[in-house]
């Protein structure tokens, strides 16, 4: 089936290619799949449907490129990363436009993603010479030292919600320490990654970075299983993360896996908090600006009873005022859900919450015909309930859906906040720093804000407790995680 080109967005629909061994290529099978704009249904071109043969080609190219790349001067590798960062910024308009068309998030937010990707590349470039070893005191005649060495070929599999940001920033740490990479973008949002591949052909030596498109169950699976891939870095859902652990265990070789997974993150608002700031914090923390499609979204708001009604009224008013519209329109506060299957999934959660007698709809809800120029839009939605059992309280919706619940006591709210298998982020609002510090310690999550939400501090580790993941990213530990520690003992 061929879709009609999306001329309304000024987009030149075309055939895209993967990056393998420094060349822009189609799939070995010759197969392509149409990519569409989720907001309009218009065609954005066709993308190769990669399979195991393409993964094998990419891993072979990455294996061949490894020795030379590993042996380059570290500052040369850092300079390449800086060139990538500069190239992304030089092409910021085009890349953000592609992301907005392909994944439905507002253009102004996708511009910000390019900026973040660029500074993360710069950050890891700057850390290059910190990949140090140490010496251990020993006896005369023996000298010992450690060094950190790359794994070889790293497989990087990423999620759909921040396409270019994940594609560009998640290759920085493995590359700068001397690994080569095979990158697999989400099949739902591959375009900006493929454009990045085209832009980098003159910057990255052939085979050092390879990009393979296709569905996760084929391309992602083949990458994890591949005997020449000893290190996998994954960003995506908990269920896929578990599958990857199983697949890695079935691989003929031992594979080290790090997992950045989902969350059902709490935001706790005590009655001594600055209420207007907490309301804004709850909205910011939900990431409505990319339709709530964020692992870190604080989607369970526990609000102390004395301010509960006021909080819910204020949040509902603010959500009703948010402009839902075409992602390319600078006036849109929030865009559309990234693809049809996910739109149906989010609508299913909303419908079941509406049908639940213990849950009340306070803002948003299921879409109507009020805005028919675009598809797949869902208004920022607020539910309230006293029941922690409700599905919308327990499950990660990964959409623009916040649920508010009242609480009475500190111990009670900490227990309820922790009563999920997830543990990615949490946000606490209070004017009592002692309460804030206690909550930061008592909440089982990898990233906690006190009187804040949403924003990642550059260089601060990000990652999950419990079922939200294994490993940390965005900091020096991520860099080290792409190295193996070697101990050398010299008798002299
Ligand atoms: P997903 O798990 O469906 O897909 C993620 C990636 O895995 C895609 O590239 C997909 O093609 C691939 N994949 C799918 N099946 C695979 C398999 N069997 N083997 C190997 N790879 C496979 O996730 P998604 O829908 O793209 O993203 C949403 C999820 O990601 C949410 O749960 C969200 O919370 C999570 N997420 C986490 C972070 C984080 O940093 N912790 C960031 C973004 C998204």
Image (cartoon, grey):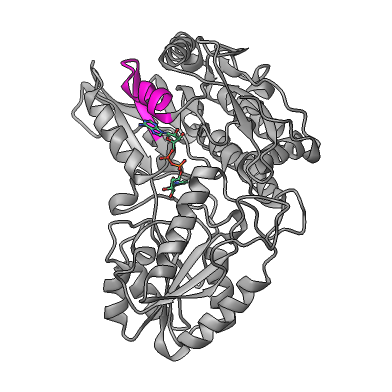
Say which residue appears at 46% left-offset and 62% top-offset: 350
Residue at horizontal 68 percent and vertical 72 percent from the top: 321
- Report if residue 218 lies within the magenta region: yes
Who's the residue at 34% across and 18% down the image?
Answer: 226
Report x, y in % for residue 224: 34, 25
Nearer to me, 93 or 220: 220
Which image quarter is the N terminus in?
top right
The correct choice, above or below, for 63 with respect to 354 in the image is above
Examine the rendered structure and indicate whether residue 145 appears above or below residue 113.
Answer: above
Q: Is residue 447 left or right of residue 85?
A: left
Say which quarter of the image contains residue 363: bottom right
Left or right, 247 with reference to 354: left
**Residue 161 colored magenta?**
no
Residue 274 seen from this side: no
Residue that lies at the very extreme toward the bottom in this rendered image: 306
Count of numbered badges drawn on the protein:
0
Give the extent of the magenta segment: 216-233
In the displayed structure image, the side of residue 6 where residue 350 appears, left or right: left
Q: Is residue 365 above or below residue 10?
A: below
Against 420, residue 40 (above or below) is above
Q: Residue 426: give x, y in percent of width and height.
A: 41, 64
The furthest residue to the left: 139
Does residue 159 appear in the picture of this structure? yes
User: What x and y, as percent, mark residue 177?
Assistant: 46, 27
User: Which image quarter holds the C terminus?
Assistant: top left
Task: Tell me which image quadrant ligand 1 sits in.
Answer: top left
Report x, y in % for residue 372.
70, 55
> Is 346 in front, or is 327?
346
């Amino acid at each position: 089936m061929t879709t009609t080109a999306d001329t309304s967005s000024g987009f030149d629909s075309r055939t895209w290619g993967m990056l393998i061994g420094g060349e822009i290529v189609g799939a070995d099978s010759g197969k392509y799949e149409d990519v569409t704009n989720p907001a309009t249904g218009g065609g954005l071109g066709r993308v190769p449907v990669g399979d195991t043969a393409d993964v094998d080609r990419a891993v072979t190219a990455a294996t061949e490129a490894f020795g030379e790349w590993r042996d380059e001067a570290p500052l040369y590798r850092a300079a390449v990363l800086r060139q990538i960062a500069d190239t992304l910024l030089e092409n910021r308009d085009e890349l953000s436009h592609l992301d907005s068309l392909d994944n439905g998030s507002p253009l102004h937010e996708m511009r910000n993603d390019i900026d973040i990707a660029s500074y993360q590349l710069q950050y890891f470039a700057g850390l290059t010479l910190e990949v140090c070893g140490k010496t251990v005191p020993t006896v005369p005649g023996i000298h010992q030292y450690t060094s950190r060495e790359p794994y070889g070929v790293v497989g990087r599999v990423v999620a759909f919600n921040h396409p270019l940001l994940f594609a560009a920033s998640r290759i920085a740490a493995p590359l700068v320490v001397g690994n080569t990479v095979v990158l697999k973008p989400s099949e739902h949002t591959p375009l900006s990654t493929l454009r990045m591949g085209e832009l980098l052909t003159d910057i990255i030596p052939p085979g050092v970075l390879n990009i393979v498109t296709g569905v996760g169950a084929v391309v992602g699976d083949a990458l994890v299983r591949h005997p020449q891939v000893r290190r996998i870095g994954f960003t995506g859902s908990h269920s896929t993360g578990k599958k990857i652990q199983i697949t890695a265990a079935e691989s003929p070789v031992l594979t080290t896996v790090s997992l950045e997974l989902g969350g059902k993150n709490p935001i706790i608002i005590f009655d001594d908090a600055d209420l207007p700031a907490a309301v804004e914090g709850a909205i910011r923390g939900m990431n409505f600006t990319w339709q709530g499609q964020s692992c870190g979204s604080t989607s369970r708001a526990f609000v102390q009873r004395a301010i509960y009604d006021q909080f819910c009224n204020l949040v509902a008013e603010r959500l009703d005022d948010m402009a839902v519209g075409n992602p390319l329109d600078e006036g849109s506060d929030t865009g559309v859900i990234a693809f049809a299957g996910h739109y149906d999934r989010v609508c299913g959660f909303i419908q079941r919450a509406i049908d639940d007698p213990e849950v009340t709809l306070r803002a948003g809800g299921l879409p109507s015909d009020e805005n028919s120029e675009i598809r797949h839009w869902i208004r920022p939605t607020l539910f309230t309930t006293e029941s922690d059992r409700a599905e919308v309280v327990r499950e990660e919706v990964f959409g623009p859906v916040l649920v508010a619940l009242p609480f009475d006591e500190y111990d009670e709210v900490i227990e309820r906040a922790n009563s999920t298998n997830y543990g990615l982020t949490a946000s606490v609002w209070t004017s009592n720093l002692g309460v804030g510090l206690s909550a930061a310690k008592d909440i089982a999550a990898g990233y906690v804000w006190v009187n804040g939400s949403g924003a990642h501090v550059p260089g601060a580790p990000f990652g999950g407790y419990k079922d939200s993941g294994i490993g940390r990213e965005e900091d020096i530990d991520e860099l080290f995680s792409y190295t193996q520690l070697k101990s050398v003992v010299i008798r002299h």
